[in-house]
Image: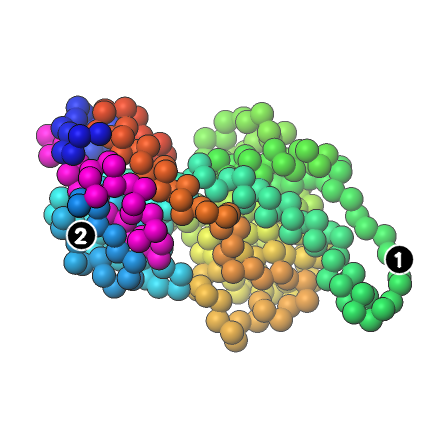
Amino acid sequence: MPRGWAVGPIPGGARSDLPRRVESIGVYGPAADRLAPILSDLVGPGHVRACSRWDGLDEHIDEVDALVAFKFPGRRFPRETILRGARLRFLQLASAGVDHLGAFDPERLTVSNASGLHGETMAEYVIAVLVHLRWNFARLHAQQREHRWQLFEVPTLAGCTMAVIGAGHVGTTIAARARAFGMRVVATRRSGAPHPSVDEMFAPAGLHRALSQADVVVLSLPLTAETRGSIAAPELAAVPRGGVLINVSRGGVVDEVALLAALKAGHFSGAALDVFEREPLPAESEFWNLPNVLVTPHISSEFQDWPLAVAKLFRRNVAAWVSGEPLSHVVNPALGY
């Protein structure tokens, strides 16, 4: 691709009268130095700015037309620095969620997320932790440590109902995997439109109807103003006692005080929590010590070489951008995803 190739109208809502050239691109994240060489043919090796320091983006943000940005674990995402980039017109986020970016002007900046990349891995995580909890592998490991041979009955997944709250790309991929285990799936999505992997779909107003049927609840909602705190005490109580809760969404969609109370009261037989309101989860958090909870470090989307997959998605989107083709997973700021 010739450096600085001018393009036609920019898809995704960005104004077509803004500069339509890609002369310099940026890579921001822990693996930036490793990823930069595979992007150099887009603009030439001297026109890729790699920033592998959390606090180093200021040095080059005004030089790039397009940027792929990863989060540094445990560090604040530099949204203010990114949004004031003088030339920046296209931003590729490395995650499915976009809450860390916040509000932006779609007339000035086109943003894409990576929601299409993480669905398979997150579905594997959900099935893995569900089997772990239902088969009580914690008990089996304890029996092994004690050299104790003791049988117990295990509830099967076939015939159970999973409620997927947030049936986007990730949620429907999870639903398909659950169906393969013989589970019935109900789900919610903004449109309420049916999906072939879901037996019964609800609009958000039907949340309690979906939860009331669930043996297993999976949260895969984006974090937006509407979904923040939407799973609170009434929603948790709507789930039949003895159910399993799995959260691969964002910690902020759940009222964690209410969740702690429900877990302590034994309302849920088990929970797998991959996301929390505050991350890393503080050492003093009560979630660490609850016997019916599996705490994982926001790992459900961390498949092997996933930064490379994001870089390849960025390549495809930049190529589409300069040729006037539709981009993948353009974010609508009005919806928050």
Residue under the point 17% across and 54% down:
60
Rendered residue at 40%/47% (across/down): 307
Other-residue count near label 2 (Cα within 10 Å), few / some / many at <14 / 14–19 / ≥20: many
Q: Residue at x 34, y 51 (%)?
A: 34
Q: Nearer the viewer, residue 2 or 29?
A: 2
Taking the view exactly as shown, the residue that stands out farthest to the bottom is 284
Task: Determine whether, in the image, residue 242 is placed left or right of residue 284.
Answer: right
Against 319, is 249 above or below?
below
Give percent across and percent down for residue 333: 30, 41
Amino acid found under the numbered disc labelled 2: Ile
Disc number placed over residue 151 in the picture, else none: 1
Asked whether 298 or 156 is in front, the reply is 298
Is 305 part of what is drawn in magenta? no
Quick check: 151 above or below 167?
below
- From the image, state whether disc 1 or disc 2 is nearer to you: 2
Q: Residue at x 33, y 32 (%)?
A: 316
Q: How busy is the neighbourhood of tag 1: few (under 14 within 10 Å), some, or many (20 plus)?
A: few
Left or right placement of residue 331 versus residue 238 in this view: left
In which quarter of the view is residue 179 placed? top right
- The residue where tag 2 is placed is 61
Q: In this picture, which residue range is highlighted in magenta?
A: 16-45
Q: Earlier in the sequence, mark 1 or mark 2?
A: 2
